[in-house]
């Protein structure tokens, strides 16, 4: 029985190209289509996904594991991954963990049983034991970590420069004359939380401002967390005049807290988010935020997974995207800028 790999070899194209042609998905030149169809005819290939998976161990399927489907950021990311996978002739199985490592482990086992050709983990914990165990048990399975680093393992990584993004956000507030700047972020064990805190504190110190520990609060990357932490921070007598939110969802929660405390944005408190998700333009006033290139990151993660699944390379890559600051209406100048870089 001819396999899809035989067709790809005869047509001198990749497996994903054959899958794309046979599934009529994505763009393929007419010349390439003709070669694939000629190879199919020559080999008498019959498309049978179950047989192909058993014989060729290739299902043209990827797993995507995310922590919180309710977060608009992960909705945008999932769309990017699915769109790119479709262009390569791949399907995507979406798994939502709710930041639960036990649930994540169950999904990993499920995806392995389904014979996926690779798994993309989005923003896992730095010490994610499931990834470590997976890499050890199945070193041949392509594993892509998107948006984070996991200590102690060698996997392909697609990252954003969290440190630089946080530095830019904090620097923006300092240049507007703010000195008392709070930082509200997600899980303490999160790579993003740590990297963004380092960028925040580095910017403060570079302008001669000593970070205040009680201006740093961590919980989860959720609206509810931003509301609870924001309400506590803004209710203090020495409340900050500006808040850097670890992501846009937290920023939305800070907006809710400010309204409840009858504080105006940006007149009473300036807010900067991180991600530039759909949240940023939905809220009023629109949110100044650090833009993460979500689409490009999802696209690259799929490319790496496909390359690995088709044995096109045997090395690991770390690809880091640079963020940019998108200025909108949630920040204002507190006073004439009196701060200058000292480092």
Image (cartoon, rainbow, N blue to C red):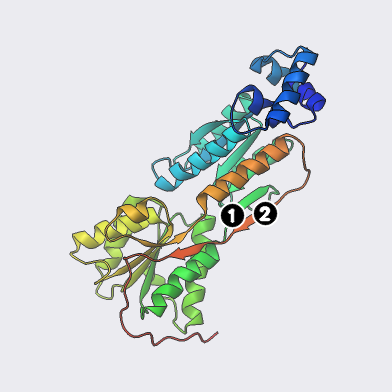
Task: Work out whether 104 lies above or below 254.
Answer: above
Q: What residue is disc 1 on?
A: 159
Where residue 254 sits in the image (x, y, percent)? 30, 60
Where residue 304 sits in the image (x, y, percent)? 67, 43
Identified at 27% across, 69% down, the residue is 266
Q: Point out which mark residue 318 bears.
A: 2
Q: How many marks?
A: 2
Identified at 45% across, 54% down, the residue is 187
Please give left or right for residue 324 compared with residue 264 in the image: right
Q: Point out which mark residue 233 bears.
A: none
* Quarter residue 48 falls in: top right
Characterize the local packing of mark 1: few (<14), some (14-19) or many (20 or more) Cα atoms within 10 angstroms: many
For the C terminus, give its image quadrant: bottom right
Task: Work out whether 235 lies above or below 111.
Answer: below
Task: Work out whether 72 lies above or below 280.
Answer: above
Identified at 59% across, 50% down, the residue is 127
* Quarter residue 212 falls in: bottom left
């Amino acid at each position: 029985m001819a396999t899809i790999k035989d067709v790809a070899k005869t047509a001198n194209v990749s497996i994903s190209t054959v899958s794309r042609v046979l599934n009529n998905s994505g763009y393929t030149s007419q010349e390439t289509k003709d070669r694939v169809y000629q190879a199919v005819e020559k080999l008498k290939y019959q498309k049978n996904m179950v047989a192909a998976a058993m014989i060729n161990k290739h299902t043209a399927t990827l797993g995507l594991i995310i922590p919180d489907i309710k977060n608009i950021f992960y909705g945008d990311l999932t769309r990017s991954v699915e769109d790119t996978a479709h262009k390569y002739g791949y399907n995507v199985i979406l798994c939502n963990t709710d930041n639960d490592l036990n649930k994540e482990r169950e999904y990993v086992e499920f995806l392995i049983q389904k014979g996926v050709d690779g798994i993309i983990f989005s923003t896992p914990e730095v010490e994610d034991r499931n990834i470590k165990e997976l890499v050890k048990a199945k070193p041949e399975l392509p594993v892509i970590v998107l948006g984070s680093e996991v200590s102690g393992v060698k996997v392909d990584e697609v990252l954003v420069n969290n440190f630089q993004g946080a530095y830019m956000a904090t620097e923006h507030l300092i240049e507007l004359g703010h000195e008392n700047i709070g930082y509200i972020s997600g899980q303490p064990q999160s790579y993003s939380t740590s990297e963004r805190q380092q960028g925040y504190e580095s910017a403060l110190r570079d302008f001669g401002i000593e970070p205040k520990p009680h201006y740093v609060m961590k919980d989860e990357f959720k609206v509810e967390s931003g509301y609870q932490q924001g309400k506590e921070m803004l209710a203090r007598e020495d409340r900050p005049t500006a808040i850097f939110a670890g992501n846009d969802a937290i920023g939305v929660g800070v907006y809710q807290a400010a309204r409840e405390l009858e504080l105006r944005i940006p007149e009473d408190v300036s807010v900067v988010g991180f991600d530039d998700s759909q949240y940023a333009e939905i809220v009023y006033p629109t949110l100044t935020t650090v833009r993460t290139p979500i689409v490009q990151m999802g696209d690259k993660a799929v490319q790496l997974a496909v390359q690995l699944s088709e044995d096109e390379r045997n090395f690991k890559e770390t690809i880091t995207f640079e963020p940019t600051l998108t200025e909108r209406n949630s920040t204002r100048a507190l006073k004439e800028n009196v701060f200058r870089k000292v480092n």
